[in-house]
Amino acid sequence: MPIELITQKQNIFEVSLLTLYLDLLHTLLYFIAVNLALKIYPFLENLMVHKELVTIIIPTYNREKRLPDAIESAINQTYNNIQVIVIDDGSIDKSSDVVKKYPQVEYYHKENGGQASARNAGLAHAKGTIIASLDSDDVWHPDFLEKCVTQLESENLDFVFANWEQESRIGDPWDFLRNDPFLTPYYVKEKDNWVILEYPEVRDLYIKSCPSPSSSVVIRRSAILKGWDEEMNIGDDWCMYLELILNRECRAAFTLQRLWDKRVDDINVYDGRKWSEVLEFLYIADAKKKIIKFKHLLTSKERKILEERYMHGLVEFAKHNLIRELNFKYSFHLLIKSFAVNIPFTLKEIPKVLINSARGKMTVPQKL
């Protein structure tokens, strides 16, 4: 065989070998690049699309059994730029041991002072520009923060809140906000699953009602003026919203998508109480404190709404003490307090409450 032919074949072989080598090298580098990209994607995503840090505050008290579900629902959010803080409000169970299983979670223990003081303690350690408070018996769906923060940022809102599935002591869970009488007038404004509330609407809504428990809300740190009100028995979050709404113009939004689950047990601050306790603490004591605290910021119409809710609570609680507790003296004392605010309204309210009681209904203030 001529030497030239041998040399030619050898060159072809070497070129083929080199091509094969380069193809293998290219494939190897491709796989390395893909794996590296998958590992650093969250970091790159945060660099390419700036995400505000969200601080999640989880106040807890003797909830070692339910606390893990709350923590895991927080750390498993699809929105990953988060700081998670657990504030132990003087628990005597094994809550501290539970939190140790989650090294990415900050844990602080304090003397028992109530849910508002626990949330404020968390706020003191917060590094985020956006705040979300998750009760330790509740559970967020994985996309809760993603959807809420996206709406908050895209519309430049002060706070947003999401609907939830309410656990029931008897029967199936239910869609809580779907038929809320105070929200239904705004359903016609729904767009892309969200309803945006302008300032007059936010103010009117929160004077009449508080449709957003703490676990449902994502709020800007700058919108929390003084924190949660530690003087309130139940409505510390409601008072915090009013602090913002009555002092400056703000905008909010809500969604009817159910993005979290509200669970119920005997130590819930609201749902775990007897109705008589809710009347005493929320509709009487807290209502009176709100009237005194915000009286200089309320219009005459707004003050009238708050006072009528307060008087309704007094009459309803007087009925309870008269019929259920047979405490005539205290029942009379409650009616006197209502008469001191407005005699004609109290006189109209007494027969309404008694008639509803005869029909087997426990009334809720019409402007709750």
Image (cartoon, helix red, strand yellow):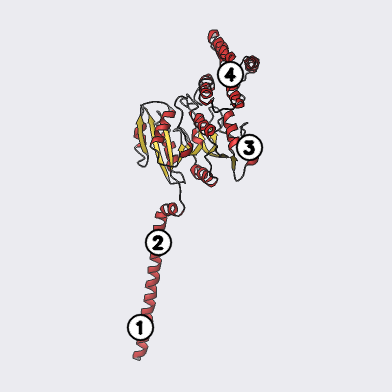
Which mark is first along the chain, 3 or 2? 2
Label 3, on which residue? 186
Residue type, label 2: Ala
Which of the two marks, 2 or 4, is nearer to us in this view? 4
Give the Cα distance between marks 2 and 4: 69 Å
Which of the two marks, 1 or 3, is nearer to us in this view? 3
Badge 1: few (under 14), some or many (20 or more) residues near its Cα, within 10 Å?
few
Residue 310 visible somewhere in the drawing? yes
Residue type, label 3: Tyr
Which mark is first along the chain, 1 or 4? 1
Which mark is first along the chain, 4 or 2? 2
Residue type, label 4: Met
Label 2, on which residue? 33
**Dot label at residue 311:** 4
Residue 65 visible somewhere in the drawing? no
Quadrant in which the N terminus is drawn: bottom left
Give the Cα distance between marks 2 and 3: 50 Å
- For this orientation, the residue located farthest to the top is 329
Q: Viewed as shown, does residue 203 lie left or right of 224?
A: right
